[in-house]
Image (tube, rainbow, N blue to C red):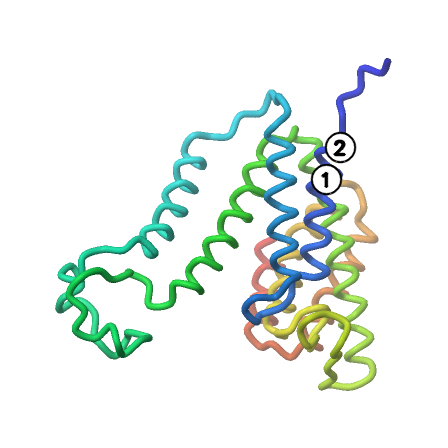
Amino acid sequence: MSDRPSEWDKYLLGSVLFISLLFGGGTANGLYTDTLIEIAAIVSAAAVFSQTSGQRVPHSVLWLLIFAVALVILQIVPLPAAIFSGLRPELLLADSGLVGETRFRFVSVGVGRTIECLLYLVAAAAFFLSVLRLRVEQVHGLLPFFFMGVICNGLAGAIQYSLSDDIAIEGLLPFTINAGLFANENHFAALLFVSIPFVVYYGLFRGHLLSGSLGLVTLLLLLLAAGSRAGVLIGLAITVLS
C-alpha cells in the first residue's frame, strides 16, 4: 500500500471548477446548467467534508459565511407588515395586491429570485469551504483546472473575434454565447482580468516564465478584443499591481 495521500478530493473540486467555467456563463434565470453546477458543488463539498482532514476552516471565515446566508434567509422570512411601514415605498412592491397589506410581508420584493440567489450563495460557500479543507499543495493543484477553463474560454473568444466583431452562438448552451463561453462580454472580460494574477504567479513563482509571459500577453489581447473598456483598464491595473 502506498503512503501517498489521496488526491480524489482535489480532482473532484477541480472538475467542478472546470465545468463551472465551461457551462456557467449564462445570465438568465432558471438555467438548468446553473442548477447542475450548484448541485455538483454542494455534493462535492459534502463528499470532501465527509472525510477527515488535518486542515481546519478558520472560525472567522465560517461565521462570515453563516452570517451572509442568514442575511439572505431573513429576506424570505414573513415579518409583520408594520415593520415596513414608512420604510419602503409601495412602488417597490412587485404585487399591487400587497399595497396596504397589514399582516405579513417579506423583506424581498422578489422571493423567487432571492431563493435562487440563496442557492448560488450556498453552492459557492460550500465549494469555498471545501477548498479550505484541502492541503496547500492540493489548492495549488486546482490551478491547472482553472487554467483549462480559461483556455477554453479564450479559444472560443479568439475564434469568435477572428470571424466577426459581433457574433452570437445559439443552440450550443441554454443561453446565447456572445463572448468566449459567456452570454455577457463584461463577464468574459472579468474572467480574463481575474486570471492575470494567477498567470503572473504561475510564470514568476512556479518557474514557467516563457509560458506565463505568453499567457499574460494573450489575456491582454483578448481583453482588447472583447471591447470592454472597464475590463481593459482593470486588466492593465491588475497587471501593474501583480
Q: Amino acid at mark 2?
A: Trp
Q: Position of residue 201 (x, y in %)?
A: 69, 46
Question: Is residue 151 shown above or below 39?
Answer: below
Q: CA distance from mark 1 to mark 2?
A: 6 Å
Callout 2 secondary element? helix
Residue at the right extreme of this rendering: 1
**Relative horizontal placement of residue 71, taking residue 225 as reference (left or right):** left
Q: Which residue is mark 2?
A: 8
Among the 4 quarters of the image, the one containing residue 23: bottom right
**Relative horizontal placement of residue 114, taking residue 229 as reference (left or right):** left
Query: What residue do we see at 65% from left, 47% from top?
Result: 40
Of 52 and 46, which appears nearest the observer?
Answer: 46
Query: What residue do we see at 33% from left, 68% from top?
Result: 109
Question: Is residue 69 shown above or below 23?
Answer: above
Among the 4 quarters of the image, the one containing residue 98: bottom left
Q: Amino acid at mark 1?
A: Leu
Question: Is residue 9 shown above or below 119?
Answer: above
How many dots with numbers? Answer: 2
Q: Position of residue 132 (x, y in %)?
A: 57, 34
Dot 1 and dot 2 residues touching (CB under 8 Å): yes
Of 225 and 77, which appears nearest the observer?
Answer: 77
Q: Which residue is mark 1?
A: 12
Q: Position of residue 1 (x, y in %)?
A: 86, 13
Query: What residue do we see at 73% from left, 59% from top?
Result: 150
Among the 4 quarters of the image, the one containing residue 29: bottom right
Callout 1 secondary element? helix
Query: What residue do we see at 48% from left, 59% from top?
Result: 116
Classify mark 1: residues with Cα within 10 Å, few (<14), some (14-19) or many (20+).
some
